[in-house]
Amino acid sequence: MTPSAGLGLKSQHYGDAIACDAEGLWFEVHPENYMSAGGPRLAALEAVRARRPVSLHGVGLSLAADTDPDPEHLQALKRLVDRFDPFVVSEHLAWSTHRGAHHPDLLPFPRTRAALDRICGNVARMQDALQRRVLIENPSLYLPLKGHTLNEVDFLEALATRTGCGLLVDVNNVFVSAQNLGYAPETYLDALPAHAIGEIHLAGHAPDPGGSNLLIDTHGAPVAEVVWTLYARLIARIGPRPTLIERDDDIPDFAALMAERNRAVAVLASSQTAREPAHV
Amino acid sequence: MSELLAFQDAFVAALAGEDERLSPWCAGHDAPRGLGVYRNTIAKGCVDALAENFPTVRALVGEEWFTGAALLFSQQSPPTHAALLDYGADFPSWLERFPPAGELPYLAGVAHLDRLWIEALFAAEAPHLQAATLSSLSSGALAAARLDPHPSLRMATFDAGLPGLWLAARAGDETLELSEAPQTLMLIRRAGSVTSRLLGEAEAAFLRAVRHGEPLGVAAEHAAEADRETPIATLFASLIADGVFTNLDLETQP
């Protein structure tokens, strides 16, 4: 089965996920939620994996920290990769660990040449430990930092060129960051190297309830129309890629998520049709 | 020190309230609102993980009290790794020292039992010993054999009846009473679900001896000393039915 559009797997939907027979459907999980010795979550993921492709999307390896990735975390990730044979393994261009503490968020950094060297080393360590290529995702940003020497697209492209990693493009993150930091999301998307893109994320966002005028990548709402438009633009340029609907808060029933997922399937299918040579 | 580490140091200090530490990297008026988003996300990540791992504590004290305590705890004792399903191992002992919990002397014990429930849920897989395995053994061989507890087995004994209060709270009972008598709670995972029940004194003594590696015969003596009324065969059969044991090691030495 070729993975088309998938869903983030939520524990309340395990039964629906196992029963659903949609063509091309796949599921993504955060491996950190499955890093236990045993228990029902692992058993449920095993049952889903028996029927569907699965992707492991890490949120805690902290590749943009100024330290090597935690070897215990890498070992736990390798055990999950060996057990579930995911079709994609991904992580973020961000950090969360600092001097022994883990801050559960995806934190920013100044994109300098030295940071690029450090993060290339960390991505290489991840790929060596897992013995496979990984995808790296663009973060959502909330703070305009001084001291960047590379823009984010150039940074990601250099990372992909030097380490052989691919890119996971979160279109919602592109939109949220562009709004918060003041640039055009279209320019960003159009500049991404098509050949490096291995997966796409779509999610919902919301205005900061704190009244800061920032947009927050909440994963707590349906994908916004403006993000669908950007997604269609990207897919029209690069062709179909496995696409994930992410929802982590205010989670609706499975059918509502499948409706969003099917909309992504339609976008992917239209791009495929447009690219196929006409029969004569 | 690398510039990246200097930035991380400054960012973490700014998260903790020293916004000015970020000034080399961030224009002053932009810092507070952006930092607020990161602070909120980190706080939500920690509080949500603690709420998931300590549901009985949260049910007893209410969401507002719990969130306040969880926020303070997460600032003083942030997660040490990314797998938050394991976060909060030291939350029970922290609650014991948390002054506002002084009026709720049972709270740390409730947190301890919530923690044991999580440990049981995520413990390693292992088969459960079947009663049929024992049917062919002589009584001598049985007395010399040692039992391996299931990896998910957890036990806790309290001088007052805190486990009963915890069980009632988990069941959603409105009226919670703390009985005067000591109680031992046992938790075990079977078929993916954690079950828990109070143990009789004989059962508790028997299981403590098993966990100390004593042979079955010695564990049976401990049980009899604790309570002469409970027949050992019945006690053993009901613990096997609970799925408490994973394996039986027969004594191979003469």
Image: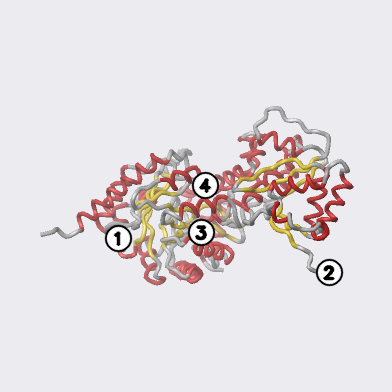
* Badge 3 density bin: few <14, some 14–19, many ≥20, Cα 10 Å: many
Q: Position of residue B193 (x, y in %)?
A: 61, 45
Q: Position of residue A243 (x, y in %)?
A: 35, 53
Q: Quadrant of the C terminus of chain A?
A: bottom left
Q: Label 4's element?
A: helix
Q: Are marks 4 and 2 in contact (CB under 8 Å)?
A: no
Q: Chain of mark 4?
A: B
Mark 3 against mark 2, which lies toward the viewer? 2
Label 2 resides on the chain identified as: B
Picture disc at residue B41 = 4
Q: Amino acid at mark 1?
A: Ala
Residue B214 visible here: no
On the image, numbered disc 1 is attached to which residue?
A191
- Is residue B242 toward the left or the right of residue B37 in the image? right
Q: Chain of mark 1?
A: A
Q: Which residue is mark 2?
A: B254
For disc 3, the marked residue is A95
Q: For the point 56% across and 46% down, which residue is it?
A: B43
Which one is in front, A23 or A54?
A23
**Amino acid beneath label 2:** Pro
Asked if residue A127 is positioned above or below residue B168 in the image, the reply reads: below
> Residue A202: where, in percent of width, then height?
37, 49
